[in-house]
Amino acid sequence: MVADVAYLEQSLQHSQHQISQLQSRFAALRQAYQANPMPSAEQRIAWLKALRELLTQEQDALVQAISDDFSNRSADETLLAELMPSLHGIHYASKRIKKWMKPSRRSVGLQFMPASAKVIYQPLGVVGIIVPWNYPLFLAIGPLVGALAAGNRVMIKMSESTPATSQLVKDLLAKVFPEDLVSVVLGEAEVGMAFSKLPFDHLLFTGATSIGKHVMRAAAENLTPVTLELGGKSPAIVSADVPLKDAAERIAFGKTMNAGQTCVAPDYVLVPKDRVDGFVVAYRAAVQGFYPQLEDNPDYTAIINERQQQRLKGYLSDAESKGATLIPLFPEAQGRRMPHSLLLNVNDNMQVMQDEIFGPLLPVIPYEGLDQAFAYVNQRARPLALYFFGYDKPEQQRVLDETHSGGVCLNDTLLHVAQDDMPFGGIGPSGMGHYHGHEGFLTFSKAKGVFIKQRFNAAKLIYPPYGKALQKLVYKLFVR
């Protein structure tokens, strides 16, 4: 007991020390930005080149650190879902920074001539990034790339739930970036809350909706604009005629990646009533084809920690007690490798249908007709992603027209997030704002309108006193 108290006191003192350092780190970033408020394209490209080389050289260490934090994370999943999109995002931005930085010419009305107008894209200043635990590398590097491409200084708060990865990312970034360009912060939840209270010029948060509300509230005190990537319950809709093998295999890939601990993982699947049994068979075959066994399988990622595993077990107990039918696809768990399971006969009173699942549990909900499926989705909070499986193009168009979500995949899952030339972001309860690619550059830039007039000033014609004949001619020509 005495040892526990001593540990808590030590932990609290450490957190207070980290919080006290935040202001000085932020001040150093702000001062560095003011000394170089418009970094050249060459400087920004050099930053990204250094980041790309670092990730390429250190990929083995990063894969191992992430696996250590999860107790087992598939090395291939880390390569596919964290390193590959990070590297491609850097390459994409590096090739386009000069184009993105060019001022945009805008038209000027005849009545304001002679004059010209343009929009210039100016760095915001100091950008804050709060990183979640589920993809601790990609969700740090992705927004960092956008912020650096736009010429900003950056402070990153890594997750306390991935201590090995967080420390490694901090150490590695310090090798290539001075602390007044990129500063990485570690610490528990109280450090994260203090971080969100800093007067950033923009703050990007990825994580739970409940925490996002606190982050936005804290940012509001400084009128700091925010980008929130929050997740939610992303549905998959199986059409009446799509081959079940196709749909089940692609949904299974999206749901089993990182053991379902993905903000855009399919959260539940809507299946025509007469196809539910066939879908269960096809889905079981797909998952067991990916993972023939659970025991000692390095491809099967574990749940991040015991607290999250207990949360998921609680969902199962609650659902079974309220009448759900559980279909486990493996016999039993091995440590934190939690068996993938389907749930039938679910209802809205169950926690599994109220909260974002964020794990290897997939409710299957029958529907009769697409109108009913769309109504089910639209009566609930708007999700971060929506997945439709069907090859009929008019039906595909209906999905796009009649549902709302942050993004859509037709006949696939997850992969829209990896497209550098598309924005990524939520809507309503699943988030606000977007980034990736050009949209990331724009999110972290101030699009500043500039109106230019030289020596000759035709506007003098409309200066007071009013009532002159020329002014009346202006009104006749342009006020109509």
Image: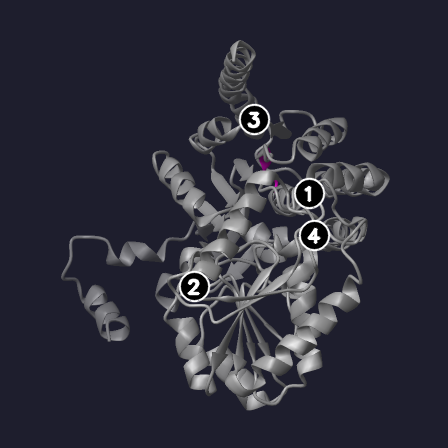
Question: In front of the other: label 3 or label 4?
Answer: 3
> Residue at the location (52% across, 18% down)?
24
Return the x and y of residue 27 as percentages of the image width and height: 52, 22
Dot 3 and dot 2 residues touching (CB under 8 Å) = no
Q: Which residue is mark 2?
A: 108
SS type, badge 4: helix
Question: In front of the other: label 1 or label 2?
Answer: 1
In three-dimensional space, the C-alpha distance between marks 3 and 2, rounded to whole angstroms, equals 51 Å
Q: Which residues are magenta?
A: 151-155
Question: In front of the other: label 4 or label 1?
Answer: 1
> Residue at the location (50% across, 50% down)?
314
Q: Amino acid at mark 1?
A: Leu
Return the x and y of residue 468 as percentages of the image width and height: 17, 62
> Residue at the location (69% across, 49% down)?
337
143 vs 352, left or right, is: right
State which quadrant residue 31 falls in.
Answer: top right
Residue 154 lies within the magenta run? yes
Q: Compared with residue 212, is residue 184 higher up or lower down, i.e. above or below? A: above
In three-dimensional space, the C-alpha distance between marks 3 and 4, rounded to whole angstroms, equals 30 Å
In three-dimensional space, the C-alpha distance between marks 4 and 1, rounded to whole angstroms, equals 18 Å
Q: Amino acid at mark 2?
A: Val
SS type, badge 3: loop
In three-dimensional space, the C-alpha distance between marks 1 and 2, rounded to whole angstroms, equals 45 Å
State which quadrant residue 274 falls in.
Answer: bottom right
Return the x and y of residue 143 as percentages of the image width and height: 61, 46
Circle number at residue 187: 3
Q: Which residue is mark 1?
A: 137
SS type, badge 1: loop
Residue 225 can be seen, yes or no? no
